[in-house]
Image (cartoon, rainbow, N blue to C red):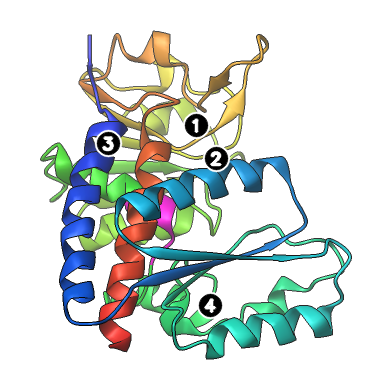
Amino acid sequence: MGQILDGKIVAASLKEETAAEANKLRDNGVIPKLTIVRVGANPSDLSYERGALKRMEGCNIATEVKELPEDINQEDFIKALKEVNDDKTTHGILLFRPLPKQLDEEVIKYVIAPEKDVDCLSPTNVAKVMEGDKSGFAPCTPTAVMETLKYYNVDLKGAETVVLGRSMVVGKPVSMLLLGENATVTICHSRTKDLSSVTSKADVLVVGIGRAKMVTSEYVKEGAIVVDVGINVDENGKLCGDVDFDQCIEKASLITPVPGGVGSVTTSVLAKHVIKACKLQS
């Protein structure tokens, strides 16, 4: 039976490190600050926002929430975002997505200031992730995957790694981050032929496909490390991942649970990114 990769322990370690950095900045008269830009009041946004605000407070990072009406038009939204860009007291901007249909993300992603874009919306930061340029900001969730593997001393050099999912939110960026650690990376998706035969060869399997409990034990190599990035609700109304945890823990050597895995680390990564942005701007 595999060991559980406890995201709460990883998050606590990052929080301690980040709070110490925030206190150093404050001692030098700089107050690190995150501004959250939220359109409307989507329950999942509000839930993540509460967690983020609590984490920032624990890390001694100032916060502000800019709530915009759900029916805001593109022109007014861009004007509001530019105001946050220009606010010298704001070092990091978190923009909740997906945006309402009347707002064009393909335009907006070019508006957010890259140096404040702590969750990788700007094409500038996306390009830096692809190039392996660490001066940018990778998305928080893929970075949380890497922080979890790092905390548990997983050696990725040369490891056969399979990423299940090809989204810009998780699959593609986490593949680039894994390549940056010299893993050998295969990207799979819903159209991959004979999927389980590919995933079952992986030393490290990262799953972000968006389907509850899709990955069963047949997808997992004996002794593999399994990282589940999915967040779903099962037939009983309980949170679950894309991996059937009860089945796969029997074969995996290390495995993340849902909840309590990668998701627990994400807001700590966000805080770390705000500190990094603050240092770069100061």
Proximity of marks 3 and 4: CB atoms separated by less than 8 Å = no
User: Which secondary structure class fits the magenta region best?
Assistant: helix
- Residue type, mark 3 in image: Val
Q: Position of residue 63 (x, y in %)?
A: 47, 64
The residue lying toward the viewer, choosing from 153 and 8, is: 8
Q: Nearer the viewer, mark 2 or mark 4?
A: 4
The residue lying toward the viewer, choosing from 133 and 73, is: 73
Please determine whether, in this image, residue 145 is positioned above or below residue 202: below
Q: Which residue is mark 1?
A: 195
Q: Which residue is mark 4?
A: 122
Proximity of marks 2 and 4: CB atoms separated by less than 8 Å = no
The residue lying toward the viewer, choosing from 84 and 153, is: 84
Name the N-terminal-most of marks 4 and 1.
4
Name the N-terminal-most of marks 2 and 4.
4
Q: Which residue is mark 3?
A: 204
- Residue type, mark 1 in image: Leu
Mark 2 closeness class: few <14, some 14–19, many ≥20 residues within 10 Å: few
Quarter of the image holding residue 136?
Answer: bottom left
The Cα–Cα distance between marks 2 and 4, rounded to whole angstroms, is: 29 Å
